[in-house]
Image: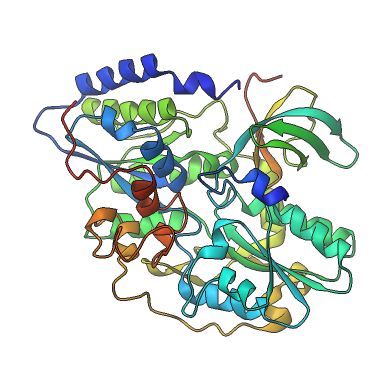
Amino acid sequence: MRFVEEFRDAELGRALSGEILATVEPGRHYKLMEVCGGHTHAIYKYGVDDLLPANVELVHGPGCPVCVIPMGRVDDGIALAHQPGVIFTCFGDMVRVPGSEGSLLDAKADGADVRMVYSPLDALRIAKRNPDREVVFFAIGFETTAPSTALTLKRAKLDGVANFFCMCNHVTIVPPLRALLESPDLRLDGFIGPGHVSTVVGARPFEFIPASYGRPLVIAGFEPLDVLQAIHMLLVQLAQGRCEVENQYRRVVPYEGNLRALEVMAEVFELRPHFEWRGLGFISHSALKLTDAYSELDAELRWGVPGVRVADPKACQCGEVLKGVIKPWECKVFGTACTPEHAIGTCMVSPEGACAAYYNYGRLARERQAV
Amino acid sequence: MLSLARCREDHCITCADDGEVMGAQAVDESRQLARCAGAGGIITVDIALVSPVAVGDQLLVHAGTAIARLQGSA
């Protein structure tokens, strides 16, 4: 398919790998964070890290929508799923995320009507087809997904669908990046920026990173050549002493983002004062809730949720993985007690999670050979 | 089932915040909907955020909504 295959060309990949090797300073260690879980997945699926010199280290960031959902929110969702007459809808990976007493899949096994959907529109269709039932859509995701939820809520309101509700868990990418940059645990040289979030928000929201923290960021696509080129662009900036936001993903990402998407999000959502992120704790103004104009569609107002904060299992080190402090295989339960089939932590549930990406693609070798 | 068809064998593209390049096959501007084809099959896509859309346009689709039109795709 056009715009896909040409970005998987092996010869070009080897050429880019050579360019990267020629750009790095021997003896200097480079630590680059790929913000987005989609990048993590692409890196291990296509073996991008095998094409990098040993002194270029990739650190996995917090941009996996499923991985950052805390256990307490899963418990809240399960409580709604068990409400009489409710059809509870959510995206595919979300059903397997463990709460304190099981997952949504377990709730389904216990009799709750939990259904997987591809899009919020699918959930709205279910509501229209089941006027005698109340349908809850468990909304997760960054700014990539939030416009789809916003449009669906607008359609629901316009069509007068009274049995459709949203439990909003949408999060925003900039606050956790700022929290990571403020963290003393982590020393990063640059960021591979989230391509599809940037499709919506544009490049401007990331300009504080070079301006205030002196780190370059390159917005990147999700094919292997996209990632390799973004790494090369970051290394060139570092070699030249530049520090800017650059856009490798120009075929999709306009500098100003998608203004219509931002407009509809501003109509439907407002920032929560604070929101808990798995592993990162509470971060101010980092998540969305429905505005007053859409409050009749807010599932949390319709039923109320327990809202109990639940600590992660002691053995699980997803928090450190999400902050890039440890590698997945450094977690005590990685690949033993915690596997994709029996996940303890969220990073093992979603294939975009760093642990699952390592596990699924056999990236268990802890030493890389120098290219 | 639609959701399963859209989730590839190795990951859920919606959970992933992962857009998918799809080609517009038929467009209903009045309802802001298009029938689009991609690697995972054919679905109905909300095009309100990128309209006007022409048949043949390549769209970045996420969670059933087109969030960008690829440059030079028309």
Tell me if residue A170 can be seen.
no
Can you say whether A297 is above or below B36 in the image? below
Can you say whether A300 is above or below A364 in the image? below
Can you say whether A53 is above or below A200 in the image? above
Residue A335 locus on image (x, y percent): 30, 58
Q: Is A352 or A19 nearer to us in this picture? A: A352
Q: Quadrant of residue A113?
A: bottom right
Q: How many marks?
A: 0
Residue ID at (60%, 46%): B7
Q: Is residue A102 left or right of residue A190?
A: right
Tell me if residue A259 can be seen.
yes
| Screen quadrant of the N terminus of chain A | top right
Q: Is A42 or A270 nearer to us in this picture? A: A42
| Screen quadrant of the C terminus of chain A | top left
Residue ID at (67%, 54%): A265
Q: Quadrant of residue A202?
A: top right
Residue ID at (35%, 49%): A359
Q: Quadrant of residue A300?
A: bottom right
Residue ID at (91%, 39%): B30
Residue A213 locus on image (x, y percent): 30, 48
Q: Is A360 or A154 nearer to us in this picture? A: A360
Q: Is residue A180 left or right of residue A117?
A: left
Residue A350 locus on image (x, y percent): 47, 55
Q: Give the image's coloring scheme.
A: rainbow
Q: Is residue A162 left or right of residue A169?
A: right
Residue A347 locus on image (x, y percent): 40, 58
Q: Is residue A293 left or right of residue A329?
A: right
